[in-house]
Image (cartoon, helix red, strand yellow):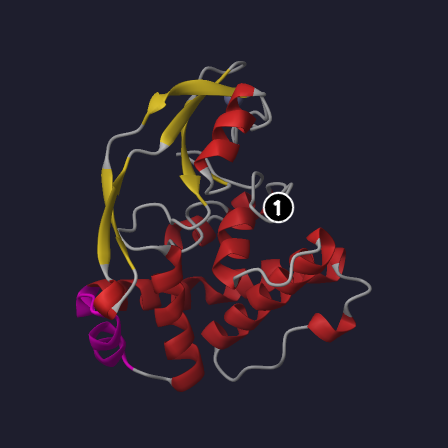
């Protein structure tokens, strides 16, 4: 599984043109049908909507592995958009709201929201470390983008990813890039999963997207 630009047309042309790399061996991915249908909850309140979709699948021309191509607005194994998950994490980090309050606000099950918050809190140390290092590597002329000190580790992780989103936005000349999009584009579709961050060696993958839409990074799945 890997994270790709969420515009279907762009994914098609990238697949057809051999511009997507296999997360396993960096070989070229070719079109290979579609993954099973999934239902994703978008938005909140009156804008809450269930959206059905079948992600595109690619097959590596070199190692023959198949990979699901997940848009940068979606996270692996999550039934909600990355934007909604990010809203919950921000509410926790900024205001210290509990999972029940956040769940009621977003119109999601409390257990689901608790799972998002726990996974991010568990991964906060490595996330802060990796994204701070990326900002130092790629943002030498962007001193104003360094993460501000934050009291809790989840807050530090959020600040670090937000800072790197600023570095990427500046590099690619876009006004803003949502932090969750930067996280998914760089770390892959399991950015919001604790397991993604437990194996420290996975961090050594080339963590650099080709575009802010994100065609790089990614983990097998
Ligand atoms: Zn391959």
Quadrant of the image containing the N terminus: top left
- What span is colored magenta in the figure? 98-111
Magenta residues, dominant SS class? helix
Q: Which residue is drawn at 37% across and 84% down?
A: 96
Residue 13, above or below 134: above
How many numbered dots are placed on residues in this image? 1
Residue 86 position within the rendered picture, expressed as x and y whole percent measured from the top left: 40, 65
State yes or no: Cβ of the residue under disc 1 lies below 8 Å from any atom of ligand 1: no
Residue 61 position within the rendered picture, expressed as x and y whole percent measured from the top left: 52, 14
Q: Nearer the viewer, residue 156 or 49?
A: 49
* 147 to the left or right of 154: right
Residue 140, above or below 6: below
* 108 to the left or right of 18: left
Look at the image and tell me whether residue 99 can be seen. Answer: yes
Asked if residue 110 is among those painted magenta in the image, a careful observer would answer yes
How packed is label 1: few (under 14 Cα within 10 Å), some, or many (20 or more)? some
Q: Which residue is drawn at 56% across and 28% down?
A: 20
Element on which disc 1 rests: loop
* 1 to the left or right of 115: right
In the rendered image, which residue does mark 1 sit on? 207
Residue 204, above or below 54: below
């Amino acid at each position: 599984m890997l994270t790709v630009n969420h515009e279907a047309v762009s994914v098609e042309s990238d697949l057809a043109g051999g511009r997507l790399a296999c997360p396993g061996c960096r070989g070229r991915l070719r079109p290979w049908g579609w993954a099973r249908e999934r239902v994703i909850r978008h938005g909140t309140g009156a804008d809450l909507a269930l959206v059905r979709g079948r992600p595109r699948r690619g097959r590596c021309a070199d190692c023959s592995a198949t990979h699901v191509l997940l848009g940068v607005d979606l996270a692996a194994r999550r039934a909600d958009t990355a934007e909604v998950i990010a809203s919950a994490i921000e509410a926790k980090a900024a205001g210290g709201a509990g999972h029940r309050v956040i769940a009621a606000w977003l119109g999601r099950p409390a257990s689901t929201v608790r799972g998002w918050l726990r996974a991010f809190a568990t991964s906060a140390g490595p996330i802060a470390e990796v994204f701070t290092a990326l900002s130092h590597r790629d943002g030498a002329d962007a001193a104003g983008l360094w993460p501000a000190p934050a009291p809790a580790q989840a807050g530090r992780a959020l600040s670090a990813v937000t800072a790197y989103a600023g570095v990427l936005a500046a590099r690619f000349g876009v006004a803003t890039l949502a932090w969750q999009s930067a996280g998914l584009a760089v770390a892959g579709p399991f950015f919001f999963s604790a397991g993604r961050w437990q194996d420290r060696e996975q961090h050594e993958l080339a963590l650099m997207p080709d575009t802010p839409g994100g065609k790089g990074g990614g983990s097998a799945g």
